[in-house]
Amino acid sequence: MTTRPPPRGGPNGRKPGAGKFSSGKFSPGKFQSDGRARTGPRTSARDAAERAARNRGDDAGTRDPWTAQGTPHAVAAAAAAAAKPKPRPRPAPVARDEAPPPRKAPSRPSARPAAKAQARPAETRPEPLAPPAGPTRREQRAAASATLASGVQTLTVEADEAGMRIDRFLTARFPLLPFTRVQSIVRKGELRVDGKRAKPNDRLEPGMSVRVPPLRLDQPTERPRSAAREQDDAEFIRSLILYEDADMMVLNKPFGLAVQGGSGTVRHVDGLLAALTGPDGQKPRLVHRLDKDTAGCLIIAKTRLAAATLAKSFRSRAARKIYWALTAGVPRVRQGRVSTYLAKDEPTDADARMRVAKHGDEGASHALTYYAMVDQAAQKLSWLSFKPVTGRTHQLRAHAAHIGHPIVGDPKYFSVENWELPGGIQNRLHLLARRIVIPHPRTGRPVDVSAPLPPHMAQSWNLLGFDASRYDPIVEAPES
């Protein structure tokens, strides 16, 4: 007995094309309800769907792609979405309304790109996120100070910190840490550089690892920041500028203004420079120091890179400095050279008096100064010009006292017996950082800046008849 195949039509068994258009060239019975041409028997499509379901591990009976749950396209998209959490090396193509003929193999890959496109629509792909902006210098310093009390931490020396002293490096990274405390932890060996003990004057190179021990700081009292006060500080600093460009500036530091803070020192140059902090959080930095009562040229770097470059110029003695002083008595040798070793009387005191020491003494460093007498008054006072080759603490003041002609108004080194201060001359330190010549940190060209006499020295020069425009013979002195 021969059985007939099931009717190829709707549920009622009638062909969709049966009717008045059932004959002729155009036969709607050869097309689906959506207008696409049939390409094969429906049984092969069902078999393909069942095989795909079995490959995915689904139940073919509960996932019938031909039910009335949606169109074939929606069913295919739902099947692809269900299969997405279970990626397979070669996912089976989602069956369309009709499967391709068995002998037309090239027609099978055509359904694969369509299924992939439906499985990963373009509008659902996440956009790449922009990289987050890095913290500013101010935020970095605040974070470093905040983590100071958290325990041991390791810092990496950056490229623009090359050549910095270890104590200056810590002071720059931790502004809230007192400088005396920095020296203490270095002296006790609590700080290590690349696993080794370091000295305060050791220099750092990029990439070095600095281990900082756990520290505790008293929480600083929050002082309200007055916009008017900051503006006044900024205007005061700008009034001292002798030279300025994008990388550096030279200030005319007045007498009596400290360069850095200390015990009982509230107002100082380093603190005033905070009023010139830029939008990126970078504050101008000190490159070298002058004594509180020494007036004259003080170099300030505007960037960390400029500070490192200018500091190298001082260490390599590429910077040339000339000082003017009013001294007691008249030296018998009008031009000379002073070469000694200097050491502190109290090594633990940062502002201790310097003494002339011998080679090999503990803490002794070589100091070299050239001097020349520019003018003299009544064989009692001399206008001396100094050119220091080295840069030791109190070097010029100690050397002037060593040759028997201490600087007028010096409270530490003036020790001439039975000497009276001439009338009209103020009892203030008569020492001026008159001139400085240093290579520019970016161009390398020399920057030559001179400072005028401070008011108390200008008064003495006028009283004694000294001409500040007179030729200075120290210019011809050796430089090494």
Image (tube, rainbow, N blue to C red):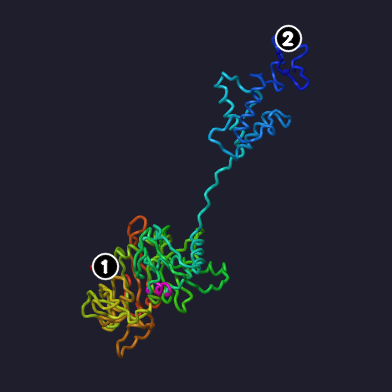
- Name the foreground residue: 364 vs 154: 154
- Is there any visible trace of residue 242 in the rendered image? no
Q: Tell whether label 1 touches label 2 (CB within 8 Å).
A: no
Q: Position of residue 289 (x, y in %)?
A: 38, 71
Residue stretch in magenta: 180-187
Q: How many marks?
A: 2
**Label at residue 186:** none
- Determine the secondary structure under disc 1: helix
Q: Quadrant of the C terminus?
A: bottom left
Q: Kindly report the secondary structure that dominates the magenta region of the rendered protein.
A: helix
State the residue position of label 1.
Answer: 475
State the residue position of label 2.
Answer: 23
Q: Is residue 285 above or below residue 383?
A: above
Q: Position of residue 432 (x, y in %)?
A: 35, 73
- Name the foreground residue: 93 vs 169: 93
Is residue 2 rendered to the left or right of residue 144? right
Residue 181: say if magenta: yes
What is the residue that sits farthest to the left in this orientation? Answer: 333
Q: Position of residue 14 (x, y in %)?
A: 77, 17
